[in-house]
Amino acid sequence: MPTNMLMEVASKLTERSADIVELTSLALVMHEYQYNGPDPTSVISKITSDEIARQVIAKFIARAKELIMQARESRN
């Protein structure tokens, strides 16, 4: 799927998980960083340093874990 379609798909999935747009946004920011690297001027990438990238990645992982745990609990 092209990355330019991810937010549209995520917005349609909000019925299942209201947090999916947040995770998708973080994933797209990480994708920009992975493709362009850090950009101190914030012209090409919203991530200005490797440290900021680590923080974004940690936030993504933490939120994804929370959502997975919530989904498991709701199934039981």
Image (cartoon, helix red, strand yellow):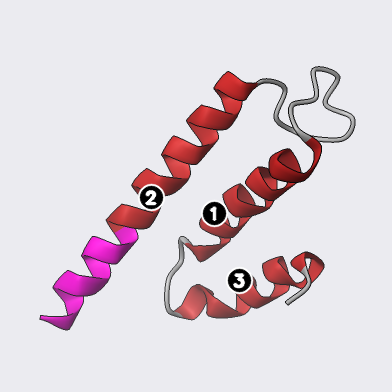
- Which residue is denoted by mark 3 in the rendering? 10
Does label 2 or label 3 sit earlier along the sequence?
3
Closer to the camera, 32 or 12?
A: 32
Q: Quadrant of the C terminus?
A: bottom left
- Which residue is denoted by mark 1 in the rendering? 22
Q: Which span is picked out in magenta?
A: 67-76
Q: Quadrant of the N terminus?
A: bottom right
Q: Secondary structure at mark 2?
A: helix
> Considering only vertical position in the picture, is 67 above or below 15?
above
Q: Secondary structure at mark 3?
A: helix
**CA gap, disc 1 to disc 3?**
9 Å
Residue 59 left/right relative to 28: left
Closer to the camera, 1 or 26?
A: 1
Does label 1 or label 3 sit earlier along the sequence?
3
Residue for point 70% across, 43% down: 34
Point out which mark residue 56 bears. none
**The disc labelled 2 sits on which kind of residue?**
Arg
Residue 5 location (% of width, % of height): 76, 72
Q: Is residue 28 magenta?
A: no
> Considering only vertical position in the picture, is 21 above or below 9?
above
Point out which mark residue 63 bears. 2
**The disc labelled 1 sits on which kind of residue?**
Glu
Residue 28 location (% of width, % of height): 68, 52
The answer to whether marks 2 and 1 mark residues whose Cβ atoms lie closer than 8 Å is yes
**CA gap, disc 2 to disc 3?**
15 Å
